[in-house]
Amino acid sequence: QVQFVESGGGLVQPGGSLRLSCAASGTISAYVMGWYRQAPGKQRELVASIGWAGGITNYEDSVKGRFTISRDNDKNTVYLQMNSLKPEDTAVYYCNAGSSMVTMARVSGSWGQGTQVTVSS
């Protein structure tokens, strides 16, 4: 089973930017990939997903126009560029893999440690 290591989080001011990376232990070329986030006391939510070759992407409404998901299958890595960050973006961010764009909210694979994103003045 593929394992994931997320990195790139940190503390930023509102309006700032971060670029998250998700490194996989094996090939991801056959998987839809997604970024998720979870704040304390709240359930994990799907933020963005990207198809096998990167041509199709989906975003949660609250991040549209601000976040961009991308992938490099040769490097087995997925990225999340986050711009115009808001305090409500504060959460632990995770990545994971699925088989279909329409079922990414219900993936059942293993989760990594995630990376903390904190947006605060």
Image (tube, rainbow, N blue to C red):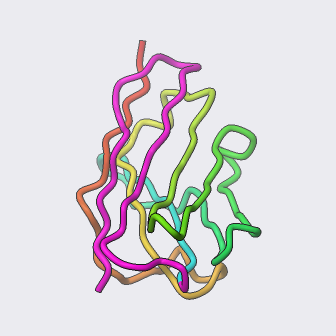
Q: Is residue 109 magenta?
A: no
Q: Looking at the picture, tell me which residue is in the foreground, 30 or 45.
A: 30
x then y, percent, for residue 78: 50, 59
Image quarter for residue 100?
bottom right
Q: Looking at the picture, tell me which residue is in the foreground, 94 or 19.
A: 19
Which residues are drawn in magenta? 1-30
Q: Residue furthest top?
A: 121
User: What residue is shown at x 28% (from left), y 73% (from top)?
Assistant: 3
Count of marks placed on residues: 0
User: What residue is shown at x 39% (from left), y 51% (from top)?
Assistant: 93
Quadrant in which the N terminus is drawn: bottom left
x then y, percent, for residue 8: 37, 40
- Left or right side of 83 for 113: left
User: What residue is shown at x 36% (from left), y 37% (from top)?
Assistant: 9
x then y, percent, for residue 54: 68, 67
Q: Is residue 23 above or below residue 102?
A: above
Q: Looking at the picture, tell me which residue is in the foreground, 116 or 5.
A: 5
Q: Is residue 92 above or below residue 58?
A: above
Image quarter for residue 70?
bottom right
x then y, percent, for residue 58: 70, 63
- Left or right side of 71 for 26: left
Q: Residue furthest left?
A: 113
User: What residue is shown at x 49% (from left), y 33% (from top)?
Assistant: 18
Q: Is residue 60 above or below residue 88?
A: below
Quadrant in which the C terminus is drawn: top left
